[in-house]
Amino acid sequence: KVNAHWYNQKAIGVGPYQFVSWETGVKIKLERNPTYWNCAQPAPFDRIEMVMLKDPQAWLRYLKTGQIDYTQVMPQQYVSELKGKEPYLGEKGLKIAFHDELSYFYIGWNQRRPFFEDKRVRTAMTLAFNREALVENVFGGLGEVISGPYVKTNPCYDQSVKPLPFDLEGAKKLLDEAGWKDSDGDGIRDKVVNGKKTPFEFSLLMYGGSAEYETLARIYREDLLQVGVKLNPLPLEWAAQLKQQESRDFDAYTGAWVPDWDIDLKPIWHSSTADQPSSSNYIAFKNAEADRLID
């Protein structure tokens, strides 16, 4: 519970820099640490100030006016305002750098829900998710589709396991096999669950501050309608989304993990964590073979 702990805003140090002050929601100040152990590589800056800009649209504006010196950019900002447009923002001194992240983005299917308890349904949802096109056209090519919870350069990544393709017909077949069929001809599949006819209509929690995720949800919604499934996007502020994830009150959500290089999969993917209220296994994933490999 580090986020709620009273000491979490009293940081002692951050390696080559030391903590100075933290104005919540405004700014964090650091300065060079004169006692840093690696004297051969001292911190390059006397001082670093991290400004909290909650509106991503302001990032490039602050950069252009010199109010900040460095920022990450959202993919659509890169595509619309920077890609192939040197000098960037009309300023000759601005440069762009690309680097890999130890992170992956995903959709989490709540296996406590009748929609997603069947593995065939979850596979069908991936087959109907045009990830290659989304990476290229929505996220500006700034990423790649992977098949496991590691970055591709990690030796744990199994190169022989290929990502599932975009295959709407394959998705339809799996949904048929799982018993989700359009019994009344309204275009939406349904199934009798606990004695009640249930249409395959679900909500997708998504980060409300991202234009990319809004576009993603719109495209995915159209593709799912082609296989008889109705997606209702539910944009939320991050704190509200996290609260619903932690309470397990969701059908599905968009998320991301930033694991260590030396990753421990147990907190997210082990059956023993599926029913722990405070665990990171939000989706209640349980699989005996996965447990064996993790252990």
Image (spheres, helix red, strand yellow):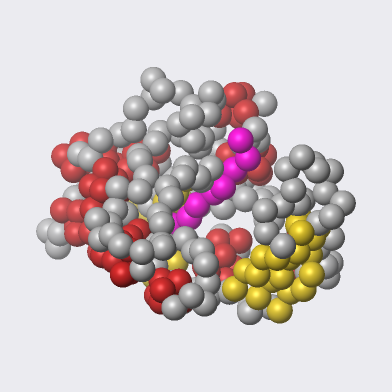
Residue found at the far left of this picture: 185
In this view, 110 is above or below 39: below
**Residue in the foreground of this view, choosing between 81 and 129:** 81
**Residue in the foreground of this view, choosing between 125 and 255:** 255
Is residue 254 part of the magenta span, yes or no? yes
On-image quarter of the N terminus: bottom right
**Residue in the foreground of this view, choosing between 154 and 270:** 154
In the picture provided, is 50 more to the left or to the right than 170?
right
Residue found at the far right of this picture: 35
Percent of width and height locating residue 38: 79, 41
In the picture provided, is 27 more to the left or to the right than 16?
left
Q: Quadrant of residue 252?
A: bottom left
Residue at 65% from the left image edge and 70% from the top image edge: 49
Residue found at the far front of this picture: 92
Residue 53 appears anywhere in the view: yes
Q: Quadrant of residue 224?
A: bottom left
Is residue 109 part of the magenta span, yes or no? no
Residue at 35% from the left image edge and 48% from the top image edge: 142
**Residue in the foreground of this view, choosing between 72 and 167:** 72
* Residue range highlighted in magenta: 253-261
Percent of width and height locating residue 76: 31, 63
In this view, 3 is above or below 282: below
In this view, 12 is above or below 295: below
Residue at 71% from the left image edge and 52% from the top image edge: 43
Percent of width and height locating residue 16: 76, 52
Q: Quadrant of residue 169?
A: top left
Percent of width and height locating residue 243: 59, 68
Count of marks overlaid on the render: 0
Residue at 28% from the left image edge and 60% from the top image edge: 86
